[in-house]
Amino acid sequence: MSEDASVRYTNTILIDHNGVRQEGDVLLHADGSWSVSNGDEDVQEVIDGSKKLITRSLQNWHTHLAMQLNGRDFSDGFPLHRWLNEAIFPTESRISPKYVRVGSSSAAAEMIKTGSTFAADMYFFPSTTGEVLEQAGLRGLIGGPVSDIALPSHPDAKSALDELDGLLATNDKTRRIQYAIATHSVYLCSEETLLQASELAEKRKARLHIHVSETRKEISDCFSAHKKYPVEYLDSIDFFKPGTICAHASWVKKNEIQLLKNHEATVVHCPSSNMKLACGGTLSYPAYAQAGVDVRLGTDGAASSGNGLNLLAEAKTASLVQRHDHWDATLLPASEIFQIATKGSQDWVAWGTDDIRMSPHGRGRNRYLSHLVYNGAECLDMWVEGRQLRKDGVTLSLDEQSIRQDIDLAVEHYYEGVEGN
C-alpha cells in the first residue's frame, strides 16, 4: 500500500506490545502505528479480522541465517566445541555468496511464515544477507563475522574489518537493513582484534555482536588465560560500546551482569541452542531483570537451535526453562515473555484464531495470547512499513516453492563428497 495508506481490519482483536487490547475495527498505518477505526476512513484495503488476532511481530536477536544450509539435524548429538571444530568450521570453509543467498532466502521465508520481521544476524558475506532481507521486505541488523581464524569470506580479521568499515558507512537509521560488527568470541578473537572491532564501532557509531559466556569451557579457558571471566575480560580491555549484543550470556557472575548493565548491553536468551548443545546452563532471567539489563530472545542458527527460526517456539521454551531452572512457576507468564519476544517491533502480524490450538477462546476471548505462546498458531498476515509480506497464509514477498527447490539443490552440491550429510 502507499506510504500514507492504512488498512482496516474489521471485527478483530488487536493486542499491542504493551498489552493494550482492542476489539472491533482497527486501522494499521504504514508508519507502524494503529488506531481505532470509525469505519469511514479512506483505506487501501478492508480485511475481515473476525478470525484473526493482531499483534506486534516477533524479533529474533541472535541468528546465523544462512546456516539453514547446515540445519535440520546437521551434526545432531555433538557438544559445542566438537560441533564447531569437526562439523561447522570444516563445512563452512566451502561457503560462498551463492550459498549464503540460498540459505538466507530460506531463512527469510521461514521468518515470515513464523511471524518474525527482524533478525540480528552473524554470518559470512553480510552484504548478501542484507540484500536478501531487503528484497524480502524484512528488517535486519546484519553482523559481518570477525575472527582470528581464517574465514571463508576473508583471509584475516583485518580484511573482514575493512569490508565492514565500508558497509557500516552505508548505515542510515531510516533504512530497514543496518550492519554491525560480529566479533565471534573471546576464544576466536585476540585482544588486538577485539579492540580494533571496538574502535571501528566507535568510529561508525555501530553495534557490536559477540558470543559471550556460552559454556563452562569458555569461561574456564578465559580465566586461565586472563585471570578474568569473559565479561570481566571484555570490560577490562574497554571492548564494550552501548548496545553491544551479547549472545547467550549464560555462565556469568552477578558482578558481570552489573557490568553489562553499566555498558548498556543487550543480552540474548537462546535456550533451545543451550539445551541442544548441552551447555549446562541458560541465561538467568531473574538476575538480569533485577539489574535492569535489556534481555531479548534469539533462536541461534538452525544447526545449533531447535533446527529452525521459530521465535514463537523459542518464547515458550524461554518461559518454561526459566520456571524450571528457578523453581518458580510465576516467572515469565505469556504476556511477559511475549513482550520480550516483540520488544522494539514496529510491524504487525495477524495470527489465525480459527484453529484448534487457539481454542477455547475463553468467555471474554481472553485466552488467545496464552494459547499463542504455549500452543502456537498460524501466521496469516504480516505488515512491514505498510507492505504486506504475507496474506491469508501465503507469503507474497518471496516464492517459497522456488526457495525450497533451491536449497535442496544447493545442499546436494554443498555437501558433495561429505560423509553423513
Image (cartoon, grey):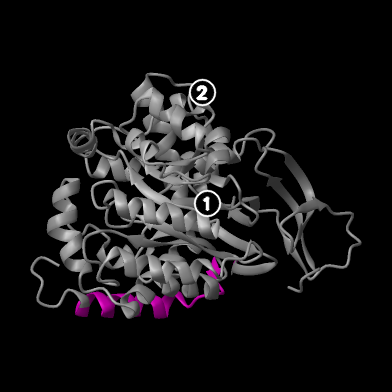
Is residue 21 positioned above or below 185 on the image?
above
Q: Earlier in the sequence, mark 2 or mark 1?
A: 1
Crowding at dot 1, Cα within 10 Å, few <14 / some 14-19 / many 20+, comes out as many
Secondary structure beneath dot 2 equals helix
Crowding at dot 2, Cα within 10 Å, few <14 / some 14-19 / many 20+, comes out as few
Determine which quarter of the picture holds residue 150.
bottom left
Q: Quadrant of the N terminus?
A: bottom right
Determine which quarter of the picture holds residue 7.
bottom right
- Going 27% across and 57% down the picture, which residue do you hit? 303
Is residue 302 positioned above or below 259 on the image?
below
Nearer to us: label 2 or label 1? 2
Query: In the picture provided, is 173 more to the left or to the right than 291?
Result: right
**Magenta stretch prevailing secondary structure:** helix
Which residues make up the magenta segment?
391-413
Q: Quadrant of the C terminus?
A: bottom left
- Going 52% across and 51% down the picture, which residue do you hit? 59
Query: Which residue is the site of mark 2?
Result: 290
Secondary structure beneath dot 1 equals strand
Query: Which residue is the site of mark 1?
Result: 59
Question: Which one is nearer the viewer's eye here, 45 or 175?
Answer: 175
Of the residues shown, which amino acid type is indicated by label 1? Gln
Instruction: Pinpoint residue 273: horizontal percent, then vertical percent.
Output: 31, 45
Of the residues shown, which amino acid type is indicated by label 2? Gln
Query: In the picture provided, is 71 more to the left or to the right than 40?
Result: left
Question: Which one is nearer the viewer's eye here, 156 or 44?
Answer: 156
Q: How many marks?
A: 2
Query: In the picture provided, is 41 more to the left or to the right than 26?
Result: right
